[in-house]
Image (cartoon, rainbow, N blue to C red):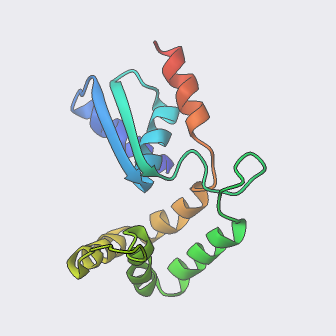
Amino acid sequence: MDTYADDLATLVEELDVMNAIHVGHSTGGGEVAHHIGRHGAERKSKAVLTGAVPPLMLKTAANPAGLPMDAFAGIRAGALNDRSQFFKELSAPFYGTNRPGAKVSQGLRDSFWLQGMLCGFNIAFDCIKLFRRPTLRKILRNSISQR
């Protein structure tokens, strides 16, 4: 996630973007959160996190609705043992195909698989452990301190 955040910071600085509105979904929400927590909110005007991994996906006393640690171990094992099949299977819950009336095309699921396969393996594997880290508290501290 540090790599994602640092890459985004480099892009924003190189393009001299000001008053940016960063929108992130799923891991992208984690990237936006981590970017602001790591690089501050100076060039941003807003952040939108939708269906995002923050504030914390891990089940803790403070987050009883989170996922147990075993779930993260299973995700990492799936990515490690058969990455291609992992992304094919992950596309179903990612798009909610298990919900009544869900209409998700095979093309969309195939696109999800392709994006997963194009991602560098180390980045995909290592970012799973970062789903367990709280990030929103740091965003709020950085955002407030820069205003």
39, above or below 29, in the image: above
Position of residue 78 measured from the top left corner of the image (x, y, whole percent): 54, 81
Is 79 positioned to the left or the right of 12 in the image? right
Viewer-closest of 119 and 108: 108
Tell which residue pokes out farthest to the top in this image.
147
Viewer-closest of 49 and 134: 49
Is 6 positioned to the left or the right of 144 in the image? left
Place residue 55 in its image quadrant: top right
Is 71 positioned to the left or the right of 93 in the image? right
Place residue 101 in its image quadrant: bottom left
Position of residue 104 measured from the top left corner of the image (x, y, whole percent): 27, 74
Who's the residue at 45% across and 38% down the image? 35
Who's the residue at 61% across and 33% down the image? 137
116, above or below 15, in the image: below
Place residue 98 in its image quadrant: bottom left
136, above or below 143, in the image: below
Who's the residue at 74% across and 45% down the image? 62
Position of residue 90 measured from the top left corner of the image (x, y, whole percent): 44, 76
Is 136 positioned to the left or the right of 13 in the image? right
Who's the residue at 54% across and 47% down the image? 54
